[in-house]
Amino acid sequence: MTSLTELTKNTKNDIKKIKKPLSAYQYYNKWMREKWSEMDDQEKEHFVNQAKKDKDIYNEKINEIKEKEKNEIRKRNIFLARSYGHVSSCGLDSGWYYTEVIGPAEGLIEYNKEEQEMYNTKYKSITIADITYTHNNKYFNHKLSLENYSKEHISIIYTSNSRKSKYPNTDYCWTISKQKEESHKKYWRCPAMNQNGVQDIPLTWCAVGYKN
């Protein structure tokens, strides 16, 4: 004889196999789906236009909210800077570099407190002009693993997603800056270094010990 426990279990399983009845609203939706499939494009046009209008309004409101957030982040005046294109030059012991500053940041993702302490930087990623630059913790950890390096003396490097690597190309390594591009650039009137003749060359402050 089947035990009471097994009988109860079998009864519940048999009930689950029975298809549940549709509600009146479900029958209505089923009828509407069939009706929609029978309509031609001209009959559907009114409803398609309504849906498009609602979608446009929705996207516009979403963009307004996102732009408001970006404007608040821009007020923090966080920029990314890089020096590149080293050229040796007479009269300059270290030669000179081109300097580029981009920003301000319009998107930020912060590390948690433990990670901020570990990496000696606040931001996990920085977004500028819809391009996200991520803190290169692989480079950071590699440097930290070497002798004679402490986290306070390691450059905080950010790279775009397509350029992330353990040993990043220095042409695409960015560091956080609080200054705008105009305050970073210094120019030096240089004789022709190529066939284009004399040109204004932007220099970093660290490469030149004087101001214009």
Image (tube, grey):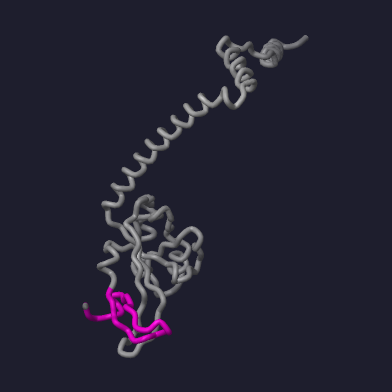
In-image side of 105 versus 59 (left or right)? left
Q: Can you see residue 30?
A: yes
Residue 206 sits inside the magenta stretch: yes
Residue visible at 38% across and 41% down in the picture: 63
Q: Which residue lies furthest to the bottom in this view?
A: 90
Prevailing secondary structure of the magenta residues: loop
Horizontally, residue 200 falls left or right of residue 135, namely left
Which is nearer the eye, 192 or 179? Answer: 192
The residue at the point 31 percent across, 79 percent down is 207
Quadrant of the drawing holding the N terminus: top right
The image quarter in which residue 65 lies: top left
Q: Please provide the residue range marked out in magenta.
A: 186-211
Q: In this view, does 165 lie to the left or right of 99?
A: right
Q: Residue 84 lies in what quarter of the image?
A: bottom left
Q: Where the C terminus falls, by quadrant? A: bottom left
Q: In this view, does 156 lie above or below 70?
A: below
Q: Position of residue 151 (x, y in %)?
A: 37, 66
**Image coordinates for residue 9, horizontal then vertical, percent:** 68, 15
